[in-house]
Amino acid sequence: MSAKLSPELEAASLYLKKLAVKVKRPIQWAFLFGLLKTFAIVVQLGCMAYVAQAVLADNRPVESLAYVWGGLIVSTLIRASAPYWQQNFLQQATFQATQIARKQLLERWRRQTDAGMPPSAADGALQLEPVEALKGYFNRYLVQQYLVVFSPLVILITCFYINPVVGFLLLLSGPVIPLFMALVGIGAERLSQKHAQQTHALSRIFTDKLRNLATIQLFDAGSEALSDVAAAGEEYRQATMSTLKIAFLSSAVLEFFSSVAIAGVALYVGFGLLGYISWLGADELTLFSGLFVLLLAPEYFAPLRQFAQSYHDRAAAIGAASMLAEPPMSETLKEAKTLHKPGRAESSKTAIHWQNLAVQLTPELVIQYPDTDINAGTLTVVSGPSGSGKSTLVRVLLGQQPYLGVLELHESFGKERVAYFAQQPFLTASSIRNNVNQYQTYADVDIINVFGQLNLGSLLAQLPDGLDTRLGEKGMGLSGGERRRVALARCMLSGRNLIIADEPTENLDEVSAEAIRQAFKRLAQKGVTVIAASHDPKLKRAADQCLNIAMSGETA
């Protein structure tokens, strides 16, 4: 009884089968040309053995064998050209399969992003090595798994017709090779899966270290980071060597048994032709029949040898597919809904609606939010004690946090219509104008007008270069309140009809905080929906709607 595959390997096998169905037509043509090559080999070797019998044993003149020479030339041409056409169709299948795999991966990432689970930067490596690992499967293994059955069968039938004893020897040795290869290859898929996972893990660790390079330097943790990368590299090396050991071992098993079988056929034919044995039809062997079966014996094992080489392509593809295949949908993901699902929020008044909304931060901690409807063109303040889940709710609304329950946005609120006003705004070491024009270009008069609404007009008047004044890294040269108001100006100029803010007035002077409050009120009056997570009591009094979040975390 075969061992039951893990869910990951089952999903990987199903993934490869579905890809194979999509490229079925070129694979079928490649199989037909491979089978045609086998028939051509049988005819070619038969003609060669017949010529040897006629010329060397029967002393017939060479010119009397014109029809045999014609068959030899035609079969040789077919044997030489069939692999070209076979490889042409295999390349088509490989290209189509990898393109489909990349498209499916992009579609999966899009669905994850819409559901609030965007892929990490390291996941981009899945488009490279794992997809490339599929090429060997479609370029070699997929057709060879059929040829390894039909091609030896054609040669075996021919050998049984020429000499049943030789056919029996080949029949006896043929199944032994796949049996021992299977014994050697037990666990090869798991090793290849581990190899693929270690490759992806190394990419993730390296990407993570690059992303947090400044933090690593700040905390003087360079040696620890190098140790992490070195440990991941060692695990990758061990996984690679384990895979290579299996490859060499299975090849050695194949060569041993095929050599023994061919030697057995050679001994039987040789002793029969020399007259040392006369039993089991050995005395009926001729130069034609003996040479023919001797030439066919290596060709009988050639498909098995090619299959042994391509079997490791399958193992590598299984390992890669275990990462490319969409994992079985968990109960959590079954409940997760897309950020832009239409529903009750389709009404003209309701901008956002959520019901039974919850976020699972850890296996033990789940934050639950009260059912809420937020009307369009209103200022809503989300408040609550620290740790109650305000910032988490902001990430959910931005599509950066997976969640449970139903979350619906009005159809006019696509992600390209949402602006985020962060507590620590992103400003570059460039001019004020360039920072405001980070994503679009606005007229100076519009920028100055918005700056005036945010009480930044006096700041521009004091700066000698006005909008051309260059800032340092992270907006150095401006106060905290001024940096935040410049970022808010960028949101206001963007024309987005939904602005989400996280602690917009936290730790600001009263002038800056009041400017932000007034800006939010004006935006709401103009029809912009503003949602702010804040403790600010003045901002709550100015809000059209207040949503209080209690400490509702509970054990899952």
Image (tube, rainbow, N blue to C red):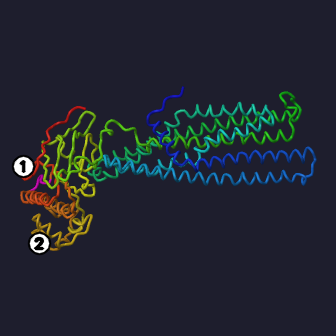
Q: Name the residue under label 2.
A: 461
547 magenta-colored: no
Question: Residue drawn 81% across and 33% down?
Answer: 268
Q: Nearer the viewer, mark 1 or mark 2?
A: 1
Q: Is the N terminus in the top left, top right, bottom left or bottom right quadrant?
A: top right
Give the prevailing secondary structure in the magenta stretch: loop
Quarter of the image where one finds residue 513 = bottom left
Residue range of the region highlighted in magenta in the rendering:
504-508
Question: Residue drawn 93% across and 49% down?
Answer: 60
Q: Mark 1 points at which residue?
A: 537
In this orientation, does residue 538 appear? yes
Q: Which residue lies furthest to the front in this view?
A: 347
How many residues crowd around disc 1 within 10 Å: few (fewer than 14), some, or many (20 or more)? few
Q: What residue type is labelled 1?
A: Pro
Element at label 2: helix
Q: Is the C terminus in the top left, top right, bottom left or bottom right quadrant?
A: top left
Q: Residue 291 carries which label?
A: none
Mark nearer the N terminus (1 vs 2):
2
Question: Residue drawn 25% across and 64% down?
Answer: 438
